Amino acid sequence: MSLSQRRLLMLLAAFPLGLAVPAHADEPAAPMVALPAASSATDAALALPAGATTVDATDGVLKINGAARATASRTSAYGVDPTGARSSDALQGSSRATLQLDFDTGRRLGDWGAQAALAFDAVSGTYAGAPTLEGDKIPGTRFEPFLPTQAWAGLSLRDLGTLRVGLMNSHWGLGLLANDGNHALDSRRDDWFVLPTTGDRVARAQLVMQPFGRTSTAARGLFVAFSVDQVIEDATAIRAQGDTAVQEVAAVRWHFAKERWAGVYYVHRDQTFHNTSGPFLKVDVLDAAFDMDYRKAGSGLRVQGEGAVILGRTDLAPTPDHPEHDVRQSAAVAKARYDWADKGLRFELDGGWFSGDDNLEDGALTGFKANPNFQQGILLFSQVLGWQSGRARVTASNPQVSGYPSADLDRLATGGAVTSAITAFPKVGWKATSFLEIYGGALLAFSPTAPIDAFSTRIGGGTPRNYLGKAPNGSLLGTEFDLGAVATMASNAWPFTLALRAEYALLLPGGVQTGMEADSPVHGGRLSLSIARTPAAVKEAK
């Protein structure tokens, strides 16, 4: 076995997988269960309750939804590998524009209905100040002029089921594994310190059934779904680069009320890397999620959670003792939010546990990586560990150590994902005026098994070393203090909301990041101007 082949063992990602369970638009006159209204194809694709913008179920409708964002950001430089290379501290300019068209015949066809959606992202990514240092998935290096995200059509039988086929976004629960990145199009996912990119995309054939949809019992809120997907792109597979990933999905989701549900899905994924004869990976995933929203009139408690277990086999990075490896990864996250409308206050507490891997020779891949659009904080995971892990291939391919660079080392990079961590992130916000909100939080992150650089660990005789070539001192990854403010301008006279958001972060690296003392603290800030349109009817179907 070559050294380079072994470098993949600890840091392989979890696999972003998805399911969409649609809500339905019409309810009986006196339902025992108030179900979410399917106000748009977006709501159905996200498997989330509809927002305030609903449509008359008797009329078909064509709707336009969109959002655009321009961001300027800058982060202080810090060490990223044992050679002394440093991250970029250049001012960066990034953007993202999203446009979506949804069509639904409503009741025009009686009990039958037809739906369709077209959507794309444009000018997405960093267009100015991108880093030039060599590496993989280095933060701020990607720019896509145009990416189609949805192109599907569906047929439904009212209160019984829906069949959809085509290109779709993939999202489930809190977005721990499958995340579409469409936060700007869904007010129920509005959160602080999150800057999502284009998310998961799949070519999907999906059947969703509502077995008790024509009853007035509590069972009316039960949905059962089956899907077959060809992954176009997610955090693990990129079809354009030769990866082939097919997955079969079975799921159950139960709405106890319009704003409260729980669900579980099972996924089997079969993937080859680079080409059909490349390394294989076969995994089974079990993911459970819930959302319990008890808020009324802008006040109250909302609790969400998601947990996932990934089990399987792969022949990536084979060794004489382990030509194949077990995949054993797991994570659990929770989010509690309390809104106190009378005082203009909002309290949040996020927490999570993400399994790690600190043994390169045991024949098991146990390091879980969340979807990069599942974000906690501004600097620690999305910037610092994203940069340091992105340099891992470059140092691991040193011919003086390995003799030749191995394939697949690009998969050492986290891409800014939360990984190998135990996190707590309390936050509080105050709506000072009708248009100004100030918020802040403190992210505390520990590592159950410290992130390890394969190159430094190898030349250190097998003793775990971090990305800077130093032995970790303790289990603290870092403490990050985040502060933000957002000014919003909206009017009933036009369907757009304009928002100017400023966010700043200060990171104090912990003992896991020994070697960063000279760069402590790390500073970062960003200023964003965004405009979004709530889904609205623009043309009735004739």
Image (cartoon, grey):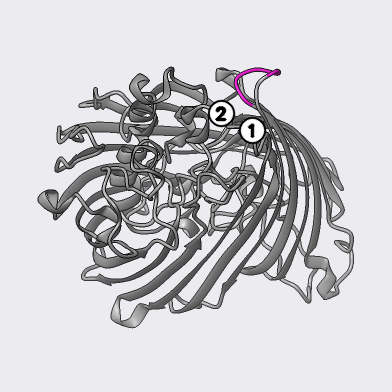
Quadrant location of the N terminus in the rendered image: top right
- Mark 1 belongs to which amino acid? Pro
The reply to whether the C-beta atoms of the residues labelled 2 and 1 are less than 8 Å apart is: yes
Q: Gap in Å between the C-alphas at discs 2 and 1?
A: 6 Å
Label 1 residue SS = loop
Label 2 residue SS = loop
To which quarter of the image does residue 400 belong? top left
* Residue at the image position 44 percent from the left and 20 percent from the top: 405
Residue 181 vs 135, above or below: the answer is below
Binning the other alpha carbons within 10 Å of mark 1 as few (below 14), some (14 to 19) or many (20 upward) gives few
Q: Nearer the viewer, residue 147 or 469?
A: 469
Quadrant location of the C terminus in the rendered image: top right
**Residue 190 in sight here:** yes
Q: Nearer the viewer, residue 510 or 334?
A: 510
The region drawn magenta spans: 273-277
* Residue at the image position 23 percent from the left and 54 percent from the top: 514
Secondary structure mainly formed by the magenta segment: loop
Binning the other alpha carbons within 10 Å of mark 2 as few (below 14), some (14 to 19) or many (20 upward) gives few
Residue 414 vs 127, above or below: the answer is below
Residue 20 part of the magenta-drawn span: no
Q: Which residue is mark 1?
A: 320
Q: Tell whether 404 sits left or right of 445.
A: right
Residue 233 position in % (x across, y down): 57, 30
Q: Which residue is mark 2?
A: 1
* Residue at the image position 55 percent from the left and 78 percent from the top: 294
**Residue 230 in sight here:** no
Q: Which numbered circle lies on residue 53?
A: none
Residue 349 position in % (x across, y down): 40, 72
- Mark 2 belongs to which amino acid? Met
Residue 128 vs 473, above or below: the answer is above
Q: Nearer the viewer, residue 388 or 215?
A: 388
Q: Residue furthest front?
A: 461
